Amino acid sequence: MSSLPETLMNRLHDHERLTQNEGEALYDLDLFTLGREADRRRVKKHGKKVFFNSNRHINPTNICQDICKFCAFSSHRKNPNPYAMSIDEILEIAKESTALGARELHVVSAHNPNYGYQWYGEMFKTIKEALPHIHLKAMTAAEVDFLSRRFEKPYEQVLEDMLLWGVDSMPGGGAEIFDEEVRARLCGGKVSSGRWLEIHGYWHSLGKQSNATMLFGHIENRTHRIDHMLRLRELQDRYGGFNAFIPLLYQKENNFLKVERFPTGQEILKTLAISRILLDNIPHIKAYWATLGLNLAMVAQEFGADDLDGTIQKESIQSAAGSGSGHGVSKEELIFQIKDAGFIPVERDSLYNEIQIYA
Ligand code: V47
């Protein structure tokens, strides 16, 4: 049973664009009604397809000049183990990963003041020269902002240099929660919300694509989540460059953020479903299995999500905070899970071109 005013129910059924207040009110719907609305939109866009890719995360360093309270990856965490890879080490990992089937390298670093600006260029160019077919999804807007400030270059120049270095698309990290007050408590000093959005907007204006994340389940509330989604919807109306929205569920171990209550499975599924409903202009909703766990990520496919991310091979950021994603998952397992849940597995590339449908 729903408990929403009739006018809002009608607007929801008619797929009209909902406002901040209406978005917040969606949480009052029972899970199945909300899920059905999200699923209608998902089926209209993607039928029964569930997308995944063959990828590998590489995190060249965990030495960071910023201190984000939720972060367990940085060497400021409770159990420090600072490292900084050389370009040769990164290349070795890149080669191993492609030998294991990765088509995409997701390269994200902490904000290490010891790497020079040209180091980034050399690193990406070295990978691209050795492995020209690999897709480089690299550099969050937080890193772009860090390089821009550290080396006193406009962020536009950093983004244009990334094109020259061979970066193909940008990941959605560093968005956290856009609300300025919550952000100041979580990660004051890092890229501001406005700058995060400007950086993605400029990247899109260059004809390139990216993703957008939202870190949830910590000190934010529903109002902040809806505000976050609507800021993304507004930017997407201008350039259309976001491929996927990725709600990242907060992992609580080994960091300095004090959180007392964690979201229920219902709240998590509602948040994903609402994102599918509100973000009518972002094609894909990713239920990132590394933070949700594979089981809930599969259930989320019934609640608006259509993507799981990928095989990952190795993951350091969420696993440092307690997720079970450190060693990735095999492609065969993803295919089995997707089929077993009654969906159609589709291996995609990084820009959602379909590579193989496992009917
Ligand atoms: O921005 C850090 C998050 C993000 C924690 O674009 C945490 O396809 C949960 O952005 N609990 C980086 N999350 C990862 C990221 C990402 C991941 C997968 C796919 C894509 C994509 C992007 O990890 C950070 C931050 O929000 N994070 N600590 C934590 N304790």
Image (cartoon, rainbow, N blue to C red):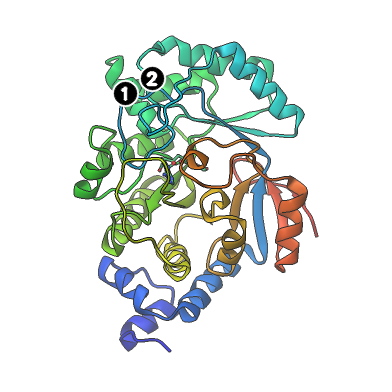
Q: Position of residue 66 (x, y in %)?
A: 30, 28
Work out which residue is located at the far front of the displayed protein and give it: 79
Disc 1 crowd rating (10 Å Cα; few below 14, some 14-19, many 20+) is some
Disc 2 crowd rating (10 Å Cα; few below 14, some 14-19, many 20+) is many
Residue at the image point whose x is 31% and y is 21% from the top:
148
Toward which corner of the image does residue 160 lie, by quadrant? top left
Query: From the image, which quarter does the N terminus lie in?
Result: bottom left
Residue contact at pointers 1 and 2, CB within 8 angstroms: yes
The residue that mark 1 highlights is: 65
Toward which corner of the image does residue 168 lie, by quadrant? top right
* Residue 153 visible in the picture: no
Using residue 258 as the reference point, say whether residue 317 is left or right of it: right
Query: From the image, which quarter does the C terminus lie in?
Result: bottom right
* Residue 2 visible in the picture: yes
Residue at the image point whose x is 42% and y is 39% from the top:
173
Q: Is mark 1 within 8 Å of ligand 1?
A: no
Q: Position of residue 118 (x, y in %)?
A: 44, 10
Asked whether 130 or 290 is in front, the reply is: 290
Residue 286 sits above or below residue 54 on the image: below
Q: Position of residue 195 (x, y in %)?
A: 28, 36
Using residue 311 as the reference point, say whether residue 33 is left or right of it: left
Helix, strand or loop at label 1? It is: loop
Q: Position of residue 54 (x, y in %)?
A: 68, 40
Tell me the amino acid under the disc marked 2. Asn
Using residue 56 as the reference point, say whether residue 161 is left or right of it: left
Using residue 154 as the reference point, say whether residue 62 is left or right of it: right
**Ligand 1 falls in which quarter?**
top left
**Label 1 to label 2, Cα distance in Å?**
6 Å
> Residue 112: which numbered mark, if any?
2
Tell me the amino acid under the disc marked 1. Gln
Number of numbered tags placed on the structure image: 2
Q: Is mark 2 within 8 Å of ligand 1?
A: no
